[in-house]
Amino acid sequence: MLGFRQMAWSSSAQTQAPSEQLCEGAAAVVAARQGMETPLTAVAEAFEELARGMVADSGELRLAPFSDTCALVSVLFSSLGMAFRFAEIEYVTKVNDLIGAGKSYRTLSDILDKDIQNDCVKKQGSHSRNLRRVRLGLGLIKALFEQFLATDWAAHPGRGTLVAVGR
């Protein structure tokens, strides 16, 4: 996985070497997830927490928790193998940008408002463009895992690394 340290998903997992540092925003999320059984469980719980936070914030989606939750999804890209390596690199780069932007902006709306004001929504490297790319990455993962559920992958455990994601 790029940009983020491999995450320990169970209490029996070994801690990583200090040289493998997590992005600052993802570190707290990973620490909170240490006892969870699978990456999918952690991602699902994080998105449920994000939804509860939106309700509490009157529909506003706060940038820092959103970015931290998106950081967890990168482990799903890496579990898909080399065919998705470019998508993983792209996704992690964009999430890292949003994690950094979380220090200056409170909500996703704040990013969009500022980029619209500066007329840079479509400019390469803008936060709003990176936000769009992260959203597309999330959509890709969602579509892939919906297809996995719709097929018989789970019924045939010996078919490869895709089944290992849920273990």
Image (tube, grey):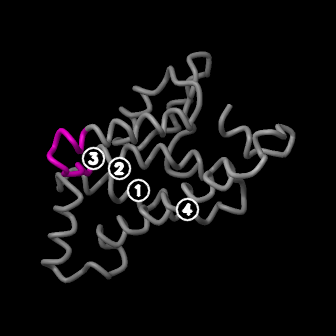
Q: Nearer the viewer, mark 2 or mark 4?
A: 4
The residue at 53%/40% (across/down) is: 5
Quadrant in which residue 119 is drawn: bottom left
Q: Which residue is mark 4?
A: 140
Q: Which residue is mark 2?
A: 67
**Contact, mark 1 vs mark 2 (Cβ under 8 Å):** yes
Quadrant of the snapshot with the C terminus: top right
**Mark 3: few/some/many CA within 10 Å (<14, 14-19, 20+):** many
* Label annotation for residue 111: none
Outermost residue, top direction? Answer: 12
Q: Nearer the viewer, mark 1 or mark 4?
A: 4
> Who comes first in sequence, dot 3 or dot 1?
3
* Label annotation for residue 95: 1
**Contact, mark 4 vs mark 3 (Cβ under 8 Å):** no
The three-letter amino acid code for the residue at tag 2 is Ser
User: Magenta span covers which residues?
Assistant: 53-63
Provide the secondary structure element on which disc 3 rests: helix
**Mark 2: few/some/many CA within 10 Å (<14, 14-19, 20+):** many
The residue at 50%/50% (across/down) is: 3
The answer for how far apart the CA atoms under marks 3 and 1 are is 11 Å
Q: Image height check: is 61 above or below 116?
A: above
